[in-house]
Amino acid sequence: MRILTRGSLQRLLKLTVVLGSLWMVLRLGFPEKGWAPTYILRYSWLEYTDADGSPEKIRLNVTHWTFNRHLLGRIPFGVDSILFIYSQFKLSRKYLPFPLSKEEEDFPLAYSMVVHNKVQNFERLLRAIYAPQNIYCVHVDNKSEASVFFAIQAITSCFENVFMVSQAVNVVYAAWPRVQADLNCMADLYNASTKWKYFINLCGQDFPLKTNLEIVRKLRSLKGANSLESETMAGEKKWRVSNVHQIVDGEIKVGIGKAKEPPPFNLPILSGNAYIVVNRGYIRSVLEDNRVLALIEWAKDTYSPDEFLWATIQRIPGVPGSSTILPSGE
Ligand SMILES: *[C@@H]1O[C@H](CO)[C@@H](O)[C@H](O)[C@H]1NC(C)=O
Ligand SMILES: *[C@@H]1O[C@H](CO)[C@@H](O)[C@H](O)[C@H]1NC(C)=O
Ligand SMILES: *[C@@H]1O[C@H](CO)[C@@H](O)[C@H](O)[C@H]1NC(C)=O
């Protein structure tokens, strides 16, 4: 295992800057038509206090060195592994600069983080789960304060592997948009990288109890299975999926009374949790499997679809990592 000392990190950074400047000199010395700039230094300063007046401010001193990807591709013998992009923010907040072990490097994870306020909490959570081999999609509620959005965007802009969701929705408690937020991140994560092995979704109030290595070991021991609740739906919850529900003035209205059609393909609706740990193949099924796509359309006017959708998909035959033996009673 590599141990990172402060001294070695500083040396590494110095090396990066020297090489970066050197490369700029080389580049300026040999201009070629049509090449974008190779070296950009961006700098921004942001001080942010949460609206609830938390005593702590978040200070972002964001200094970026950006190297043109296209040009990096031309540099021989993997120099881009040295010319990595590092920012002042990542350094001062002590984000991990490289994977702590080969085992973790070979088992990247994808995170979806659905947040709406408390930027400091978000930043602590990100720092706690951050590893450079992982990939993170952040969904900031479209209704959030503009300052929350900009502060979180400033943080994510410091990382190659942390990004804002391409489509943010207005999240409504217990209604479809909560699922849509995760779905949009799933699509972006699936598209952004083919390497990650497992998907984990979090909200802004989560905090990890395990290190990345401990999480990786647990996930490897699942041998491709998913880890999520999928139980028989209790009788007193059935109204959630047997009646049509609508969002009125930003809230879900219960008891409009109209009965829903039965689920597509007679899928048994199961009950579970909004927070899941699933493999990449499960996400592919969510995005591409016709049965799942039909179920998603059907679920859009139900109550709290986040608490049955993932659980139901988990029992569909052929979904990678699923468990098709139904719980007794179905
Ligand atoms: C931000 O970081 C840059 C580069 O390290 C430094 O020159 C500048 O003084 C810092 N700004 C503040 C306000 O701390
Ligand atoms: C996001 O918010 C804006 C402004 O309130 C609104 O016009 C837009 O429709 C919202 N987008 C979504 C996807 O809800
Ligand atoms: C995937 O990414 C490519 C570019 O990287 C983009 O053109 C395409 O629209 C994306 N697809 C989806 C489903 O997001």
Image (cartoon, grey):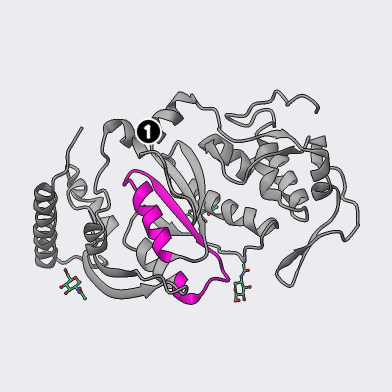
Residue type for callout 1: Glu
Task: Estimate the x, y position of residue 318 in percent, counting from the top left.
Answer: 65, 28
Work out whether 219 lies above or below 56.
above
Number of numbered markers: 1
**In which quadrant of the rendered image does the C terminus lie?**
top right
**Residue at the (8%, 59%) spot, across then down:** 18
Image: magenta residue range: 119-148
Q: Observer-nearest residue: 34 or 259?
A: 259
Task: Estimate the x, y position of residue 272 in percent, counting from the top left.
Answer: 67, 40
**In which quadrant of the rendered image does the N terminus lie?**
top left
The residue pinned by badge 1 equals: 214
Q: Is residue 185 left or right of residue 307?
A: left
Q: Is residue 137 left or right of residue 236?
A: left
- Whether residue 161 is in magenta: the answer is no
**Residue at the (16%, 67%) spot, across then down:** 31
Work out whether 274 lies above or below 1.
below
Kindly state the secondary structure of the residue where label 1 is placed. Answer: helix
**Residue at the (20%, 43%) spot, across then down:** 78
Task: Estimate the x, y position of residue 144 in percent, counting from the top left.
Answer: 54, 71
- Whether residue 142 is in magenta: the answer is yes
Task: Estimate the x, y position of residue 315 in percent, counting from the top left.
Answer: 69, 31
User: To which quarter of the image does residue 251 belong?
Assistant: bottom right
User: To which quarter of the image does residue 86 belong?
Assistant: bottom left
